[in-house]
Image (cartoon, rainbow, N blue to C red):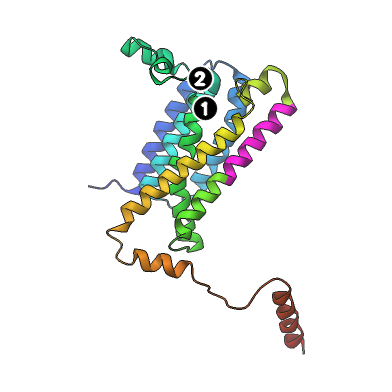
């Protein structure tokens, strides 16, 4: 039997609060942990308050839950210090970085990829159900918004690092000396979103019989008349006509 939305969301909420409390205990850098959790608190409030009038699918809530849990791990240790290599070595006897050929702690890179991979689908659900996008735009716009919000987060990181400076600023920024860190993070988020939307399109291709027709229709011109100065002229003409 499918678990009702209310019970499922309650389960995920309790599980996330448990993870949050455990990882809030003695973080490596308390001030950085606090900064990392500002957006988490905002996201959780939005999800809880929006539940009354906009319920997402279980898949979307699960993807958001996984991403927030991964983010909390990064917040606990700071993204540059998550000891995934030590964990892997404890289980296998070999370091993960050595096995893959990495030369730095790439937990932050993985999370940026997961940002696109895990959050593009919930954004697609919002676009389809609120904006009523179809076809091509139902896949492109979630990816585009993921890319733009990734850029916004890099700007927030830069601003916070500049504002606080010192050890806190460097811990929050987590570049590890890579001058192209922000560019690589945005590229990985974009790749994650592209992967998610490609996979979603492939899943929809066979069962959705009008898949090709919907794509074609979504790219057709809906309003033949140009906007810009022409639209402004039409609006003023309508206003003048209605005021008479």
Front residue of 16/74: it is 74
Residue 139 visible: yes
Question: Residue shown at 69%/27% (left/top)?
Answer: 161
Q: Residue furthest front?
A: 101
Left/right of residue 78 with respect to residue 92 in the rendered view:
right
Query: Measured from the top left, where is residue 76 in percent x and y?
Result: 52, 21
Q: Quadrant of the C terminus?
A: bottom right
Magenta stretch bounds = 148-163
* Magenta-colored segment: predominant secondary structure: helix
Q: Quadrant of residue 242?
A: bottom right
Q: Could one spot residue 52 in this view of the protein? A: no
Q: Position of residue 209 (x, y in %)?
A: 29, 65
Give the residue number, with chain letter if any, for mark 2. Answer: 105
Q: Is residue 57 placed above or below 181 in the rendered structure?
A: below
Disc on res. 108: 1
* Residue 133 colored in magenta in the image: no
Residue 151 belongs to the span the image colors magenta: yes
Name the residue: 40% across, 67% down: 214
The image quadrant that residue 241 belongs to is bottom right
Residue 208 sits in quarter: bottom left
Residue at 41% across, 45% down: 196
Residues at circles 1 and 2 in contact by the CB criterion of under 8 Å:
yes
The correct choice, above or below, for 73 with respect to 61 in the image is above
Residue 158 — which label? none
Residues at marks 1 and 2, CA–CA distance in whole angstroms: 8 Å
């Amino acid at each position: 039997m499918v678990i009702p939305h209310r019970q499922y969301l309650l389960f995920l909420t309790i599980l996330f609060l448990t993870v949050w409390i455990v990882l809030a205990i003695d973080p490596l850098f308390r001030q950085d942990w606090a900064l990392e959790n500002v957006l988490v608190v905002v996201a959780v409030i939005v999800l809880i308050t929006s539940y009354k009038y906009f319920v997402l699918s279980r898949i979307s809530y699960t993807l958001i839950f996984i991403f927030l849990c991964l983010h909390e791990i990064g917040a606990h240790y700071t993204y540059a210090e998550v000891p995934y290599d030590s964990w892997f070595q404890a289980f296998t006897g070999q370091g993960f970085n050595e096995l893959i050929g990495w030369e730095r702690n790439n937990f932050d890179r993985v999370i940026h990829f997961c940002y696109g991979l895990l959050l593009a689908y919930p954004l697609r659900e919002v676009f389809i159900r609120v904006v009523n996008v179809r076809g091509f735009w139902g896949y492109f716009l979630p990816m585009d918004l993921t890319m733009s919000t990734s850029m916004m987060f890099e700007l927030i990181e830069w601003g916070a690092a500049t504002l606080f400076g010192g050890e806190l600023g460097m811990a929050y920024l987590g570049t590890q000396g890579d001058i192209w860190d922000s560019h690589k993070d945005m590229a990985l988020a974009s790749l994650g979103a592209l992967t998610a939307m490609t996979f979603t399109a492939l899943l929809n291709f066979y069962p959705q019989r009008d898949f090709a027709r919907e794509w074609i229709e979504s790219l057709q011109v809906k309003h033949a008349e140009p906007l810009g100065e022409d639209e402004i002229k039409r609006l003023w003409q309508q206003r003048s006509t209605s005021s008479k």
